[in-house]
Image (cartoon, grey):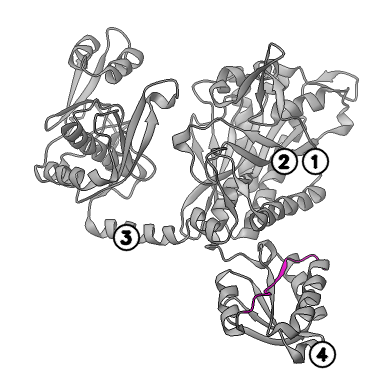
Amino acid sequence: VVSTQSTGDLTRPLEGDCSLELFKFDSPEGKSTFWHSSAHVLGQSLEKIYHCSLCIGPALQEGFYYDLSKTERPVSADDYETIQKVVDEIVKQKQSFDRVSVPKEKALEMFKYNKYKTEIIQSKVPDGECCSIYRCGPLIDLCRGPHVPNTGKIKAFKVTKNSSAYWLGDAQNDELQRVYGISFPDNKSFEEWEEFQRQAALRDHRVIGKNQELFFFHPLSPGSCFFLPYGARIYNKLQTMLRDEYKKRGFEEVVTPNVYNSALWEKSGHWQHYKENMFSFECDKTTFALKPMNCPGHCLMFQHRTRSYKELPIRFADFGVLHRNEAAGALTGLTRVRRFQQDDAHIFCTKEMINQEITNCLEFVQHVYGIFGFEFSLELSTRPDKFLGSIEVWDHAEDALKNALNKFGKEWKLNPGDGAFYGPKIDIHISDALKRSFQCATIQLDFQLPERFGLDFQDENGQYIRPVIIHRAILGSVERSMAILIEHTAGKWPFWLSPRQCIVLPISEKHVDYAVEVQKKLIAAGFYADVDLSDKQLKKKIPLAQTAQYNYILVVGKEESEAGTVNVRTRDNIVHGTQTVESLIVEFQKLAAEFK
């Protein structure tokens, strides 16, 4: 339930005139409250089973988790059934969620047995003020709420996984245990979720990546992907597609260093705001760091000589390697890595150019996502609590983005307080084949870095003017985009992006020479062509090639060798019949040009 601007429990009395709205599970607010309450149920069961100190238990975009202290007997998958039984009993009891407001001093006394809760109270609750506590059965927990009326509202509950974590996400703090769960208000929703999980598992990029020999990870370089030849084909093709667009859209590709003196990051503000996520080291009694982003380097590039207004806009594009020190427990396949590349670009322009440049960026996004068949939505993320610069400058930047979004004409929504520390941004969320939402592209307006670096250009009167920077990425991390594409396509790559565009199958050893000749012609034409030189029979070669997701399977025998042709079929067993290699190349060229 929400009254005016505050969200509260359904059972909490209204304290004044207000507008009233009730949230069900199908709303974001309803899901968040339901899953937050479910986290308390999970916390109560963990406390009972492990006699642990509970830490925090938030709702997530899907489900929830609860962190707990290290215990003599660590949590494992073998315990899920035991946890489930305790949860079922809590739900059966229909325990109410009762809210109490207590002074800070009283709260510290109540939670003196739990150092994590007392740290939250000390850091979050001002002296002399009160904080809210919720009681649910024997569990008394520090919490702002709101909650569902009682635990009986939870009709389906499942522990999904467990992992390690750190207190407050900082590797310098205590190591914790984390238990994840999901819950629903009815069994039908739970069954639908389970079916969705089954479908998602079939598309898991880590499984497909292994089966198709695209990539792997190794403990000797955690969070850094090894792209095998077939995977590198996709990775490079994505970059090639963007490079072709850069030529049409006025971007100039640059190459910048991987390592910088920490003085650069101090100047940019990243050292103060992002240091814990950077890999740093000492060299020649000086601190250096691997770059986690390209923008400061591009500022140096802009600044290295005097710039004229006639040069603007300057659009630098950079596929440089980036490193970010993600927590070990957060590393997940290609979606969360430590070493990656972005389709990163920075546009240096005048204030008068902002609207057109932002519009150009949005049209670029629309073009690229259209190629992949992605639907997308737009969000304007505004000034966060921690930010650089003045509020006046921020307001001007936010107004500029609003104007550009309105001009673009696609519906957008506001995401208050989620901007970057240096400027507001437009976040673009895509939906894949399973209707899952991912944030990849971002367009950020930055008035701060030009100030911090003292960037300027000469106008037509010889006056030095401060430029504006637009940060722009479309795929974002190429690694993460590749993971999304693998799951979006379920590994059935469109021809233009496929690492296995075709394979030549000789019927017998007599036709191997011709098969290799066909392969060489296709490779010379710019396509990925393999040849199966094994002694397997054709009836076995064809299904193996189809399972490997070769888009086209070219069978050659005596007749094809003599006529200079191939017998063509697809991975879906659609037989196209006999055609010349030359006509097939023309067909392939058309497919590639049309991104099919």
Disc 1 residue type?
Answer: Glu
Q: Which residue is mark 1?
A: 253
Pointers 2 and 1 in contact (C-beta within 8 Å): yes
Q: Secondary structure at mark 2?
A: loop
Residue 590, image quadrant: bottom right
Q: Which residue is mark 2?
A: 319
Please give the name of the residue rendered at 81% of the width and 35% of the height, measured from the top-left corner: 314
Specify whether residue 96 is in view: yes
Q: Which residues are magenta?
A: 525-535
For marks 2 and 3, the one nearer the N-term is 3
Q: Secondary structure at mark 1?
A: strand
Q: Which residue is mark 3?
A: 192
Q: Which residue is mark 4?
A: 563
Q: Which mark is residue 372?
A: none
Please give the name of the residue rendered at 61% of the width and 18% of the height, measured from the top-left corner: 389
Q: Is residue 591 left or right of residue 394?
A: right
State which mark lies toward you, 4 or 3: 4
